[in-house]
Image (cartoon, rainbow, N blue to C red):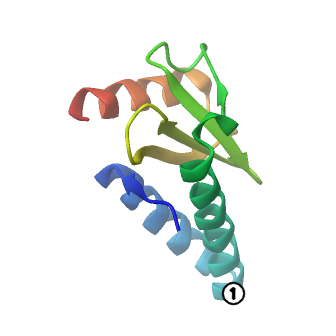
Amino acid sequence: MSEFRLHPAAFQDLEEIRAFLAKDSVSAAELMLDEVEITISKLAVFPQMGHLRPDLSSRGLRFHVVRSLLIAYVSASNPITIIAVADGRRNPRILAAILRKRMKRE
């Protein structure tokens, strides 16, 4: 299995997603996180699979959607680095600000 690295804040994103979804259904939360993990594993093998979003980042981040979640990652690193897992319906300005802040700490 290919490797990937989670930014500490991305790990926190996943924990928050799990907690939020588990309020209604633990099994639904686990299913969603399994889908995210499978997708991240595929991205680790095929890092160019994601798409660019110049409206969110000019720093070469790539993005991939899993249901309503948007995975932001650095494809140029080896292993790839997951910067964020966020609700893709968020305001793009807020999401861009979060990504800028996380990239500074990267």
- Residue closest to the eye, 46 or 60: 46
Q: Please say if 71 is above or below 28.
A: above
x, y (%) of residue 76?
Answer: 43, 31
Q: Residues within 10 Å of mark 1 (few under 14, many from 20)?
A: few
Residue at the left extreme of this rendering: 105
Q: Quadrant of the C terminus?
A: top left
Q: Please say if 46 is above or below 17.
A: above
As shown in the figure, which amino acid type bears the numbered disc 1?
Answer: Ser
Please report the residue visible at 58 percent of the width from the left and 40 percent of the height from the top. Answer: 47
Q: Please say if 60 is above or below 72.
A: above
Q: Is residue 23 visible?
A: no
Say which quarter of the image contains residue 48. top right
Please report the residue visible at 63 percent of the width from the left and 80 percent of the height from the top. Answer: 30
x, y (%) of residue 4?
Answer: 43, 55
Left or right: 5, with 60 as reference point:
left
- Residue closest to the eye, 47 or 61: 47
Q: Is residue 106 visible?
A: yes
Left or right: 6, with 96 as reference point:
left
* Number of marks in picture: 1
- Residue closest to the eye, 81 or 44: 44
x, y (%) of residue 72?
Answer: 53, 39
Say which quarter of the image contains residue 64. top right
Please report the residue visible at 59 percent of the width from the left and 51 percent of the height from the top. Answer: 45
Please report the residue visible at 47 percent of the width from the left and 45 percent of the height from the top. Answer: 84
Q: Secondary structure at mark 1?
A: helix
x, y (%) of residue 52?
Answer: 63, 22
The residue singled out by tag 1 in the image is 27
